[in-house]
Amino acid sequence: MEPVPDESGLASGCTKCPRGKYKSTVDDSACSSCGGLSTLQEGGISSAACTCPAGYVNEVLDDPANCQPCGQGFFCQGGTHKQACGHSLTSSTETANSESECICASGFFRVESVCEACPKGSFKADIGDGACEPCPAGKWSNESAASHEDACISCMPGATTREEGADEMSLCVRPDGHQLVRCISGKVCHVEITGFNLQDGHRLALSTSSCDSGGKAAVPNVVAQGISKPATSSGSLHVWGDAAGDFSPEGGIYNLCWCANMRDLQCGSLQTDFILSAGQLEVIGPFRNHSLDCVRGQTCLGLRPFQGHQLSIEDRVAVRRACGGSEVLPLALANPNGTGSLSTFDGEFYLTFVNVLLDADEAYTICWCGGSCNTASDFAVPAGHLQVLGPYTNQRTNCFLGQPCHLQNIKGVGLTTGDRIMLRTDCETGPMLPGSPGNGIAFRNENGDFDFVGESSLLWSAVGIFTMCFCRPSLENCTHALDFRASLGLFTTKGPFYVTRVCEQGRPCAVQLVGIGLNVGDRLVFRNHSCQSWSYEGVAFQVFMELPEPLRVKDDGNGLEVDLGTLPFGSKPGPGIYRICWCPADLLCTSASDFRGAAGELQIHCPPGTYYAQSSRACAKCPKKFYCRGGDPTDANKVSCAAEETTLHWYAASREECVCLPGYGIVDGQCVDCAKGFYKSATADEECVRCPENTTTFFAGASSNFSCMPETMLTPEDGESELNASISHTHEVPVLTFNLSITAAGIASDAISNTVASALRNMWGTRAITEVDLLYDSKNSSRRMSTMRTLVVTLKYLTMEEAETFAEEVDLSIASDAVLDTLRQDEVLGIIDVQPSNVSVSLLPLICRANALVPPGVTIRNVEECLCTSGYEYLEESKGCSPCGIGEYKRNGEPLECPQHSQTLVASARSIDDCLCVAGHYSSGSCEPCVPGRYKSNIGNETCSQTCPSNADSYPGATSLEDCFCVKNYHAILSSNGRLERCASCLPYVGLYCPGGFEPNSTEHVQPRAAAGFYQTGSTFATKCRVVLADGSSACLGDNQCAEGTTGMLCGECPAGWAKFEDAHPCEECWVGAATGQLSTAIVFEITKIAASNFVLAALAASASANTNLPLHTYMIRSLTQWFTACALITHFNLELLETPFAQASVSSDSCDEEQFAQHEISIQAIEPNSTKTSDINEALENFRLSWPVEVSHAIAMIFAVAAVVPKLTSVQFAAQCRAFELFPGRPDAQRLAPALYFISLPVITLFATFLVCAVVVYFVVPVASRFGVHFNQEAKTKQKKRKRIQELFHGSWTHDLKLSNMPLDLPKFRGLDSFASIVDTHQRFAKEICRMKSARDPQLEAVLAEKGLDIRSFSSPSTDFLFAKFSEEDLKKVIKEPFVPLELISALVHRAQEWDLRGASEERPAKQSGRLQEAALASEAEQQAKDDLRQGTALPDTTRDLSSLNVWTVDCLDFGLFTPKPGLKTLLIQSVPVVWPTLIAIWPQLLSQFLSLVWCTPIREDACVRPRLVPNPSVVCFSDDHWPLFIISIVGLSVWCLGIPCWLFVLIYRLGKTRQELESGRKYGLFIRGLEPSMWWWDLLIKRADIALMMLIAYTSMIEDDTAKLFVFAFISGILLCLTTWFKPYSNNQAEILDIMETCLLTTRFVLYFVVAMLLIIFPSPTTVRLCALFVLVMLISVCAFAVLHIIAQALRQEQKQSLANEDSDDDEEEDVQELVSKKSTVRKIAGTFKRLKRAVLENVVPFFRENEEEQWTLVWSPEIQNPRHQKLKKSRSRGRPSSHGVRNKLQRAVMRARAIFLRFGISIQRGSVVRAYEEFHSLWLEEFEQNRVPGVGTLCALVIAHRQLPNKGDVTEAWASEAEKVLKDAAKEWVLPAHEFTDAVHRLGSLPVEKVLKLINMVDEALLAMRYLKDGDPGDALETLLKGPVEDHEGDQVLEELPADIQDHEEDHVLEELPADIQDHEEDHVLELLPAIIQEDHERDILELLPTVPSRWRRH
């Protein structure tokens, strides 16, 4: 220290020496300086304290003055102190003296008091505390603490960054350089690219060259030189153009060059700015260099080649003038848009244009469109040019009609010789122009003109304008009209139109012409024949008209015409048709052949009042009584007036000129006979005149007042004598006669006479009676044949005046012509001529026959007109008058019958008073019948006095008591002599009705009859019939009449030669002579159907039983089939025929005495009293029948027919009966016995058929299918999928190594290898063997061995494992992959061989080698066999598996899960057991129903007694001789088959015990026990069988006789079963209890079905209500069937998808292998490929609908460390096709998806419930099945579920399960996501494994979790290792604590609480739950039941 002076300078105190000074003495002297040194602190006391100053350091201890600068990055406080500034710090100078001078180093910056490294993307070059600088834009750095700008790396050329400070390369804005995007040429191009940090504004450019090249060329036909618009959508979306034409480059692949268009990287130049490649753009489109030709009018097919890039047959092309516009060019009417299509052949595309009708041109453009082509502008891509060859359109030419025709001056493009033109009405659909020459086709000649080739070139077509159509024969046949489709213009046929001109003889005639190309000066001629005839002689008309030359056409102002003047009468020209032939003025028209143009026809007709006479071929005048309208010769006929009419004069022309004859008056325009008392004498249309007063006429039709006579002459009293006085027996008739002389050629004269008389009557009418007699020549009087005959014609008239008038007017020449015409029509007569003679008039006397007279005032013309006198009548047989018979009388010549119901007592009665009433009638002025109920037995006019008994009636007019009958509802009681005694009532009789009356055509009384649906078994008893026809009606038609095909008692039997298909069905006729074949076919078909269908079901069940994810569709089918069986019984009843229980009272009696029957409650009084028809009774009964629609019954029957799977071709029952009839005709008992024998033997036949089906499958189907690559077991499928890799394995370069290897060949282990190198990863030992053999062949080995002094034997001695013990996997891969083994590896191998030799291992060598030699021999043999099998295409042998003894572990290699490969017959018989049982159970319901039917007896009341009769065969009396054989068969069948089969099966399954749930048991009996809870395995065998048996027993026995009561009981049984099922829930909980749900739905539907029908029968509602209920039942059945079928389909599809997903990695190999195997079977390959694609499509598109997606999954999250699972719902995904959250449509979609989830049982709540039920089932399995007390925790189940994921689907996997669980528990902190369905799968799998192994597995996992929970302070992994150090089987459940740490092992289990914390030990056991771990305490609000499983087992015991 040194003194401190005060103000006075004196020392006032001492202070420390400052740094750099010291003082070693004790005094007041000052401190001494250290010189250049300093002290480390104040108060230095000696020079030794002097040292280096701050900022310097003394590093040489012996020299304190040696001070050096501290150095940069350090600070020195002096002396030897030197301290680094620390990490990230430095100093600015080299003499820093304190830590404060430490500043941040380069690359670091100051943050508060700490220097932190510059972050990535920045740097700091200077030291100091300043900030870091960011990397400039366009650079990036991922280096922290960068100290220089060089650390910032530049982005690739053309790329930059958005901002400064980029810290990774990905921030360089740039695209991915290897993208391939696609656009369609002709569409606006939108592409999306990916890249790094893209943003809007980038651009892309298209280039044909590389983007980094300097001479890039823009792609033509792209807008903006191929540069896109600025990018959008965060820089990913680039667009070229706004319209289709903006982007139309050629198809190809172009480079996408990218430009950032940001910062200093602008996009101005394609060459310099677009240098980064974004990949390539694939433009779909055509090339532009196509030049194609197409011929007009033809389909241009195969225009090739049409080239481009990625063209498709879906693309379209069009023909345009220019592409991209709205203008279209129609190719044809059917193709208005001008489009074509693309097709491909041999890999080459070609164009097709159908019916190209465009005008010929060379400059059409082919425009292409890809994708959507809806408008013309879409065709915007030019693809080349199309030249259309052919003639131009709009050309014209013409020819004259009937003249030669040639087509000239036709122009076009590319026309060639041979082109053809056809004349058509139109070129689309019109036919060839008729009449055109050369078949309408003109050929192009060498001069360019078109000529018609053929016999003639004359044009005969119609006149008009037509179309010329083109065709080129090189492409078409050009022979049919439809081949000529291209129009080239119009063709005109010049000439007159065909007209018809009608002229009449005697009148002027002119012909007008109309046509095309007509001119004045044209000429006409008229011909008898066609104008096409060239003969001029045909121009007969000019000769007659004396015309010197053809007529010229003139024009007089009214048009063109030819005037013929007035046509004269006569035969030249006679009436007829003449052709008008035309010649144009342009021709000379000098030859007749020039007049070929048909201008029409001239028709010359007869004028009115004349007719055409055939004999003279001229017009003749019309005679009287006829009228003639005139006209053409065919219509100019004479028409006769009516018989009562005539004409007043000749030449009558119309019907109006006909007037009434005398004796006929006009009434309402008709001529009718004058009535009695009237007459008419004039020929006129006048009324008849009344006779004078008190006079009348004898007959009607009087023609004179002379016919009027006094009325008194016609009265019997006063006028009889007066009449007799005026009667005359003679009369004179006026007649007209003339002769006809006929010259004939030897024909019988009688034939001529009849013909002449007929001809004259036709000419003159029937007013006069015409008689023709033959006069014989005196010289030839003895001959009847003569060449000259004379006929006398006599005409008889009523008056002389009429005869004389006709004689004056008649023209005999006309008559002779008419006769001649008539006679000449018969060529046989050979008439030559007819000549008439003079006419004479005279009187001809007539004399009447005996008892006949001439009526007064009547003129007669024949004796037949005389009348018989009173009391006589004319008889045709005697040709005379005979007396009147009994019942007749006659007065004044008119015979009359007595009035109705009266008769005379004698003959020849002359008065009505002689007529009396007959028996049964009485007189009341007239004879009336006796009233009903009375009768009269005698003839007379008295009243009816006798009456019928009570309730009897009679028809009107009854004559005796025998005519009395009982009225309706009563029947006759007869006396002993058969007479009616009384009438009894019919109302008490059930099923009978009494129509009353008599039997038809009989006097027997009608007794009670059976109504329809009933059969009368006694006089007053009837039974309801069972047989129903196809239309739903009963076979009993009523009155004991049976429908066709039924007969016998109750119409329940078949007639001879007929048989039944089923019970209660009508019989059908047997096939004659075909019964044997029919029976064989029926048996084979039915047995095959049963065996095959149940084989499929058994195979499904066997395969499903070994699957961990139990597929449920097999068990759903089982439930659905049983439901079908129970519900199908409804079809056993005829619902539409059922009556309400109150409709009738049923009667039963055991005695034969007559009893009182309950009266039928149906009131038949509603039936009409007079009705006796059965239909009336039926209509009354219909009111009490259930109005069930027949259509609904048929629909229900069709639904249940689905259960048959395959429809019946024929019925065995039917065929057996027919065959029995053929063998034993007349033996109905044989027909009944034949089906029974079949059914008793059906199980045996079925067993044989089942074995046969199995044999066919095993020995034929499986081997044949395997040859085509189809396998039926998983093992074979695996072989098939990996066959190709195995072949590579055997054909590789190391095959020789494999042969020399001493390792056993285990080929199946290598089937999953993807490459040789993967052998190292999976099978290192085998890889080492390969490497050893490869090294042994390597030429370097010998040199290395020689160097070491070893030989090759030394290398061969060591084991392979020893040689390669130090080799890594990479070393092994190197040896296998490289062609030569690396030298260093060979040296290492030799070194190891030397070690082996030095270790003296030679002692072990002999023992090892002897064993390995055997292995090598086996391997060599197996390998050689494998190679042989490969060459033959067969599967590889499996040398590691012996399948002779089947066990559950080898189920993968079982075909269909049932059969081993190629088993022996004995083995096959044993292996067929799983198929036998389903088959026997399947036929069990059918057998039960058939055997019960054989003893189904019902009592039937008959007259004498009540007899039990067999219901299926009512003619058989039960327990009679006919019934005993059937009864015995039934009892045997029921006891042996129906009771024995289920009981035997139950015993077999019961004896399985705890092994019942194991895989082998499931494979054999899984169809009956799988799908059920383990404890309810008996449900299907006992409950379901008992249910069906009880239903059958009720349905097919008389336990309950009434059908209505049966339906009530069915409903009751269905309800009981529904309650039991709902209560017990017997089915497994798999997939959210879907089996229980489905069973409940099915049973509910069954209950409702029977309940609804039963209630309808009770309530008996209105028909409308019944129909609605029936419709409801039908809809319900359809719905539940759809529900079940959809779930079955869903299960099947899910299972198939699981298998597909498991095998998807090798699908491609599988497809290649299948194609390779069937390369020579193209059809099989196509079918296999098609099936596989279809399967994939179904799985990809349909299965997602039946599965929950990620949004619908409910999951739990669990980890071994936490152990308490928590719920976690997966994040929603916006997958394609999922509905969004807006809009009604989306809401509807979501609603549908929710409904689908509920329907298919995978909704959220359902999944949550399934987890709870799975945990419950886990506990139930543990407590009940495994009989354990301690309950495992929920964590145990979670760990087992997770470990279960990695297990194979089949086999005993407990060891693998334990191993996987160990892996799960080791990773304690990992969280696992557990879907709901995995819980159910795992629990089900636990139940199917052996009990002992499952116990060990669960105890191991549970105790491990317990140890992990309470050893948290330690390492859980260590504790687990300790717990799991031994194999699983070394641990027992309750002894696992032995493996825990020592501090826990020392304590007994009961004292485990002593080791817990003290605060827990102090509490009572009852409160232990309060002291649970914190994780439980924190969840105190949870349900304690949920937390209980997590409590350790030892705690729960307290």
Image (cartoon, rainbow, N blue to C red):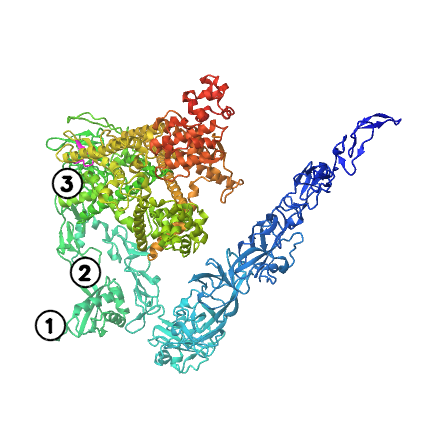
Q: Residue furthest right?
A: 8
| Quadrant location of the N terminus in the rendered image | top right
- Front position in the image: 166 or 986: 166
Check disc 2 and report the residue beneath it.
Answer: 862
| Quadrant location of the C terminus in the rendered image | top left
- Front position in the image: 109 or 849: 109
Task: Tell me, for residue 1230, which label it has, or none.
Answer: 3
Task: Tell me, for residue 452, which label it has, or none.
Answer: none
As measured in the structure, the alpha-carbon distance from the residue carrying label 2 to the one carrying label 3 is 82 Å
Name the front one of labels 3 and 1: 3
Q: Is residue 1138 magenta?
A: no
Badge 3 crowding class, 10 Å Cα cut-off, few under 14, some 14 to 19, many 20 or more, is some
Mark sitting earlier along the chain (1/2): 1
Amino acid found under the numbered disc labelled 2: Asn
**1567 shown above or below 528:** above
Say left or right for 1584 vs 225. Answer: left
Find residue 848 and report its horizontal and vertical position in percent: 15, 58
Task: Tell me, for residue 782, which label it has, or none.
Answer: 1
**377 shown above or below 1590:** below
Question: Quadrant location of residue 158?
Answer: bottom right
Is residue 631 shown to the viewer in this render? Answer: yes
